[in-house]
Image (tube, helix red, strand yellow):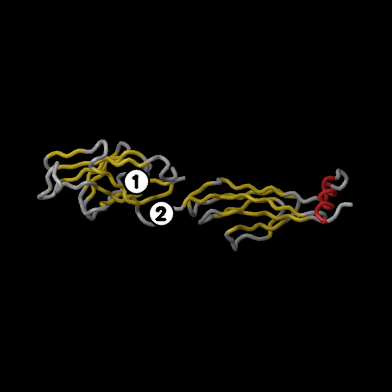
């Protein structure tokens, strides 16, 4: 004897009554986006149903058996389509991963002891290296600013930018974060190459933008 859900499944598997079983397929494109970008939901089901999300989205609700809907998730969101019939109910789900842009700039710091660093009369430079897996590849440079009160010449990914003490630059905008960063600055009065007076490290701040 079959009871409950097992009884429903038995009916739905029967070729004579299969038309009474609920079906649903929900898809999202793209499945990975920058925060606030448009995602297109498409679905095809055996009947009308209810579209929902986690976290909740008040703009969703009852929908026809097939259709499309544009959404702009601000955080990683799982969307659900629930469809019922006289014999069963089914839910189809899809998750959209959202790449959040860090609110604060991140420092990129290189030490004088690192490879690619050096000092000459009046100038000092270091090379900082950011691993490829340190940030999602969709996160790119928005601006670069001094992180330690020095003016800089910054070279990265084949481009260069001049930074004032209080003047950010967008000359490196849209470049990837990963790779080698050469930071060069003038020695201050009293700083001497090879002596403890010379800075042991240099740093700039990088602000982010997300690019699809």
How many neighbours does mark 1 have within 10 angstroms: few (below 14), some (14-19), or many (20 or more)?
Answer: some
Q: CA distance from mark 2 to mark 1?
A: 16 Å
Of residues 18 and 29, the one nearer the viewer is 18
Residue 82, percent from left and from top: 70, 55
Residue 38, percent from left and from top: 53, 51
Residue 88, percent from left and from top: 79, 54
Residue 208, percent from left and from top: 38, 50
So how many labels did they put on this image? 2
For the point 32% across and 50% down, which residue is it? 107
Using the image, tell me which numbered label, if any, was put on residue 102: 2
Secondary structure state at the residue bearing disc 2: loop
Q: Which residue is mark 1?
A: 173
Left or right: residue 144 versus residue 184 is right
Which of the marked residues, 2 or 1, is nearer the chain's N terminus?
2
Most extreme residue toward the left, as rendered?
A: 190
For the point 35% across and 39% down, which residue is it? 179
Residue 181's quadrant in the figure? Answer: top left
For the point 19% across and 47% down, which residue is it? 199
């Amino acid at each position: 004897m079959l009871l409950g859900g097992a009884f429903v499944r038995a009916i739905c598997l029967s070729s004579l009554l299969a038309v009474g079983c609920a079906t649903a397929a929900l898809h999202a494109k793209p499945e990975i986006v920058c925060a606030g970008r448009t995602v297109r939901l498409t679905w095809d089901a055996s009947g009308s149903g209810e579209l929902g999300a986690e976290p909740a989205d008040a703009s969703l609700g009852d929908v026809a058996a097939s259709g499309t809907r544009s959404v702009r998730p601000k955080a990683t969101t799982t969307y659900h389509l629930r469809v019922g019939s006289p014999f069963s109910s089914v839910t189809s789900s899809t998750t959209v991963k959202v790449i959040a842009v860090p609110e604060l700039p991140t420092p990129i710091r290189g030490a004088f002891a690192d490879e690619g660093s050096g000092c000459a009369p009046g100038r000092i430079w270091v090379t900082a290296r950011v691993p490829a897996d340190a940030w999602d590849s969709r996160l790119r440079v928005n601006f670069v600013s001094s992180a330690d009160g020095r003016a800089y010449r910054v070279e990265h990914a084949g481009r260069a930018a001049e930074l004032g003490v209080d003047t950010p630059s967008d000359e490196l905008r849209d470049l990837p974060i990963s790779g080698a960063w050469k930071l060069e600055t003038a020695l201050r009065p009293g700083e001497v190459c090879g002596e403890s007076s010379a800075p042991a490290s240099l740093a700039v701040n990088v602000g982010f933008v997300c690019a699809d």
